[in-house]
Image: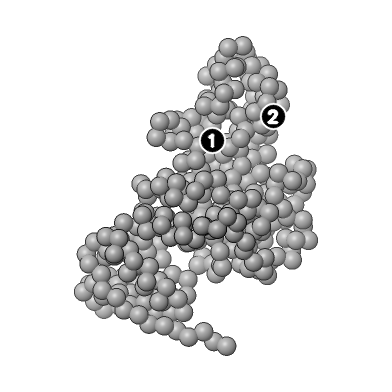
Amino acid sequence: MKQKTITKVIKVNDKIKEKMIEFYECKKRLKTPPYAIFQADENDTVITLYESGKVMFQGISADVEASMWEMISKSDGNLKDFFEEESNKKNTKEEINIPIDISSIGSDEVGTGDYFGPIVVTASYVKKENIPFLTELGVRDSKKLSDEKILEIVPQIIKKIPYKTLILNNKDYNSYYGKDMNMNKIKAILHNKVLYSLVNENNYKYDYIVIDQFESPKSYYNHLSDTNKIVTGITFITKAEDKCLSVACSSLISRYIFIKEIDKLSDKYGLFIPKGASSYVDDIAIKLVDKYGENVLSDVAKLNFSNTSRIIRK
């Protein structure tokens, strides 16, 4: 049965108009109707903002999209507070279960617990038609698969599954990390960037956007207060890589790239670079410092880890 198309019109003030122009920047159509500021596509809804301040929403979810802007208007145009509140509502249950047979976009990161190597964050799009392919490959959380298995199956995954990846190298990480930039804020910014890039790339049809939760939704959105390009409607789930295939794919792709980056470091410095943050990692770091000097750590390691003080003492 064909779903009914809904048309809804609301009136917004100049402040909300500016917010809407920013919000739909990457979703605008090339052609604009007469007397309109822009026309944009948001999943199954067309949004037209007129110079008069009237906004027309047309589509299957037009009432939902219009209601969102009515609520933002009531919050005086503060998008960050609105999205924080909505995410908190969406994640009030102790455990969230999502259906298996869905299309989803999910993101996950690797490298945040490793002294050596970069932070790698990936967002993947898995449509439900690709679920059998991924299940047959044995896609699951990267921490449960050996590096050898990851190196074997990820090249097959990336040929079929759309994804976006960001790599934050150690030098940049060390320059960013400080009083106003902790690990969770770095992760939030990177997750938002890869999700925004993927969501706005090809108008993918999805049922859920999922992040493997590393902090509360309120804290996550608070970290993004300095950006206007924020992905919303996210479902935050702990151990999401076990519950959502798109997150599992992102976990595997991130791990695959991380392994490759670690191998590059090993080749560059002529020394096997281990993962993790153990005493063995300290021993390798000491050898690197002996050979290349103390400054080498800023290029290969995360200096805020306690390993650094132990290495320098030794």
Between the C-alphas of marks 2 and 1, the distance is 16 Å
Task: Identify which amino acid the numbered label 2 is placed on.
Answer: Pro
- Nearer the observer, 129 or 218: 218
Image position of 75 (left or right of 151) = left
Q: Residue at x 59, y 22 (%)?
A: 307
Mark 1: give few (<14), some (14-19) or many (20+) Cα within 10 Å.
Answer: some
Relative image position of residue 164 (x, y in whole percent): 56, 53
Q: Name the residue under label 2.
A: 274
Q: Is residue 14 left or right of residue 203?
A: left
The part of the image, by quadrant, that contains residue 133 is bottom right
* Image position of 211 with respect to 42: above or below: above
Instruction: State the image coordinates of residue 114 (x, y, percent, origin top left).
Output: 62, 33
| Residue 123 in view, yes or no | no
Residue labelled with disc 1: 169
Q: Where is residue 111 in the image (x, y as percent from the top left)?
A: 61, 38
Q: Which residue is drawn at 56% across and 64% down?
A: 208
Height in image: 242 above or below 100?
A: above
Question: Is any atom of residue 2 visible in this view?
Answer: yes
Q: Is the residue marked by circle 2 packed among few (<14), some (14-19), or many (20+) residues within 10 Å?
A: some
Q: In this view, does 47 lie above or below 26?
A: below
